[in-house]
Amino acid sequence: MSETVNQPLPSDFPNDPRVPEELRNNVFITTLDKLYNWGRKRSMWPMLFGLACCAIEMIATAASRHDLARFGWELMRASPRQADLMIVAGTVTKKMVPQIVRLYNQMPEPRYVIAMGACATAGGPFKEGYNVVSGIDKFIPVDVYITGCPPRPEALLHSFLKLQEKIEKQSLRTVPWYRPGEDDVIPVPMLGPDLVDMRRAEEIRQKAAAQAQQPVPTQEG
Amino acid sequence: MAEETPRPETQAASAQPSAAKPAPAAKPAAAAPKAGGHGAAKAAPLATLTPDMQQLQQHFGESVIAPAPYVGVLLQDKSRLPEVATYLRDELKYDSVTNLTAVDYIKDGYFEVVYHFQRSTGGEPLTLKVRVPRPQGNDLSEPVPSITPIYAGADFQEREVYDMYGIPFSGHPDLRRILLWEGFYGWPLRKDWHEAYYEGDTKPFDSRWPGGHHQLAEERVPWADNVNYPPGFDPLNFHADPDAGLYDSMAEGVPGLKVVTKNGYGETTTTVLGNGQALAEEEELRTDQIIVNMGPQHPSTHGVLRMVVKLDGETVTDLKLVLGYLHRNHEKIGERNTWLHNIPYTDRLDYIVGMANEWGYVLTVEKMMGIKPTERAEYLRVLMAELTRIQSHFWAIGFLLNDLGAFYTPALYFITERDLILDFFESVTGSRLMCNYFRFGGVSRDLTEAQLAQVKELAFERIPRKIDELEELLTDNEIVKARTIGVGYLPADRSINYSLTGPCLRAAGVPYDIRRVDPYGIYDRFDFEIPVLYGADVYDRYRIRVLEMRESLKIVQQCLQQMEQTKWGDIQAGKKAYNHRVPAGQAYARVETPKGELGFYLVSDGGQNPYRYHIRSSSFINLTSLKEMVVGHKVADAVVILGSLDIVLGEVDR
Ligand code: SF4
């Protein structure tokens, strides 16, 4: 057996005499990676989850004119447990970000994130707002960013194609979800006097303590 | 205003060099509110009283009711507010409080709470103002009596004022923060409260122009992020409770519910009702009530709304809403922006109906500047606003069906039609949703021949046919009828008391439409009706939208015909300008968007930026009445009733 496998394949493989007659033209040889990625990239289940104006364009993308189903991505799931793609479509606010992180943690691996629009990418027109997070990538890793306010449906489709390209390049040997050990869980941010990124809690504590030592400079610039 | 009359800070960036020095913001509050403007160089002119205001003044005496600067009356003694409100409601027949907000006059040392009372039969609103001294630092101010017991529609609006300004309302049944969370540090709309990325009081910031030495906000601020913490804050030993007080009034009858009571700022005490104990106290064994949080991530909440429902079996026995998951700080940003900057932001309020919002804002500013758009622009505005109404109602009906369980299929038909209208918007304005089309005194572009042909095809051929199809599909559909007739009933008087506006109010038999009760634009030139139905339930809220689409279509058709008499290209009154100055003053103006009354309350100090920019949004205020509509229905109907209100979270949370 191993001998056969190690032999280089002839160029007219389908007609190779070693392949039984009934299997000819029905056998394809590929790498496991390719097969795995080919299946995955055309059956993404996005999460049914919109935040703001960009979600309206996301719905328009799923509707008949732009028809997401052509790419095999139309099955929007309302439960994060069944989804493997999160489209962050809209402004990420401080009040909402704990929920987004929690939803992300609940999604099983492999999972992907598309940051749709200026707001999800970097805060967009509302960046200076006191309740706005300057981009979802401050908390969760993002695979594809789309510009626009809102991005057109075509731009969203483009991001799907880009994500497919990304998936194609992944290899079973290196993907994080087959590595031993626990899944990475992102600590859920806390809504205290302001939004607290718990990964920075120690730093915040020290800085705030140092601030308490000195007389507070007024915010007046 | 005899002694010190400093100019407001907002003018520091303006062209008058004499006023260039901003005063320190943390100026101690003045002992008592003074009469006069908010620090304008001259005392502001006092309002002339309308007959209703005179009657109010006669009844309560001049020592209680005095003319206020610019518009409205000032209530000198705030403890008499409930009395005055009751008189307004019962004697003067101002049966709803359409707008309620506050303004921080930091130079004069007081907050001014502004009420706009409205008659459901029409006419101008009556403006009433109440002042409270500004407190020190982050403290709460003196309380103002709540008018929620008199006008149910004041409920969320008072909570918003409390959330943004730290003005408590005594006697309010459930005074908690509404857009932010319990424990948030500070009161964001106070003029001396600065967000983390604060750069200057008004735009354009010096760093961008003319020097152009802009630095990334993250590199500029101490925490390298959009956050600010009080000194000494220790996140590792902090008990965060953003929902404090939420379940308090819902706890009864729910065993095992953790009750958290708020005990002053930042402190909380926790009581846990033991499951067994609660059960043992019951005389007989009943079904437990449970509390379910729907949202903020839920497919049927139309965005990031959170409904907390108390269920007895499947029946909703109590409901509370948690808002603010899309609070994007429109008002704070709006006060930094220049007047023109704000137009694209209004697109993002209710992002389904961008151009209707623009009209509301532009109309208010035009009222303050005293300008009128050109004829051609007036027609273009009506054309855009009515097409917006049609596409919004298509959307609303499609998603109402979604909520009924007809998942996505009917919506697909209507989204197709909507896309065609958006195509027209896109070809004229350059964008499908965020059109940024209106300008002070006009609009930004005229139609080409091809665009005219495109819209005519839509208005005369395609859309009328599609509305017929829609009706054929739905109006007599048995399932639709069974699920919607009699569901979510709210009678007319309650609707008015809740300040409900828009199609939902008209479906309860009240012919209240801003296009008729307080006309704007050129709606008086068209032959159309304000449809009214009397069912006050979900079915009639659906039917009224269909009728309104037909009326809008009539307007669009007439508009296209009449427009031919106007001059092509004449779309802007006066010169195009980037840098508008709006005379000092205050104004409240509103338009009828597809969701209801959208009003803007603007205060100008004569500079390039609004001093106060308040949005009266119908989606937000309509939600006040949701509880009364839903309680007693099954939880599946709660979703449908919410769908029938047709809210958009961008406008709810702003
Ligand atoms: S990027 Fe623009 S369209 Fe998208 S959510 Fe932000 S403001 Fe809305």
Image: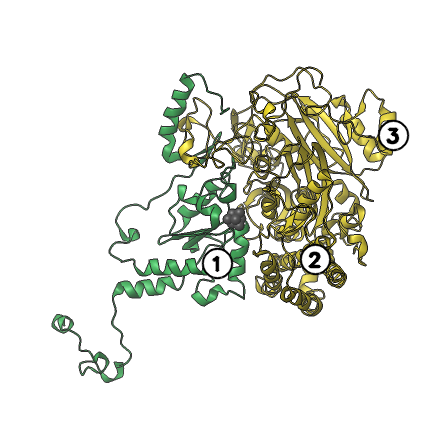
Chain colours: A green, B yellow
What residue does disc 1 label?
A: A76
Horizontal relation, residue B427 to residue A83: left or right: right
Image: B553 above or below B363: below
Task: Using the numbered discs, state the Cα–Cα distance from disc 1 to disc 2 in whole angstroms.
Answer: 36 Å
Q: What amino acid does circle 1 point to?
A: Met
Foreground label between 3 and 1: 3
> Can you tell me whether the CB of the residue at mark 2 lies under 8 Å from the nearest atom of ligand 1?
no
What x and y, as percent, mark residue B458?
67, 66
What residue does disc 3 label?
A: B55
The residue lying furthest to the left in this view is: A3
Q: Residues within 10 Å of mark 2 (few under 14, many from 20)?
A: many
Task: Using the numbered discs, state the Cα–Cα distance from disc 3 to disc 1 in whole angstroms.
Answer: 60 Å
The disc, 3 or 2, on the residue closer to the chain's N-terminal end is 3
Q: Chain of mark 1?
A: A
Please, what secondary structure does the residue beneath circle 2 have? Answer: helix
Image: A12 above or below B157: below
What x and y, as percent, mark residue A129?
52, 37
Horizontal relation, residue B100 to residue A67: left or right: right
The C terminus of chain B lies in quadrant = top right
Task: Using the numbered discs, state the Cα–Cα distance from disc 3 to disc 2 in whole angstroms.
Answer: 41 Å
What residue does disc 2 label?
A: B383
The N terminus of chain B lies in quadrant = top right
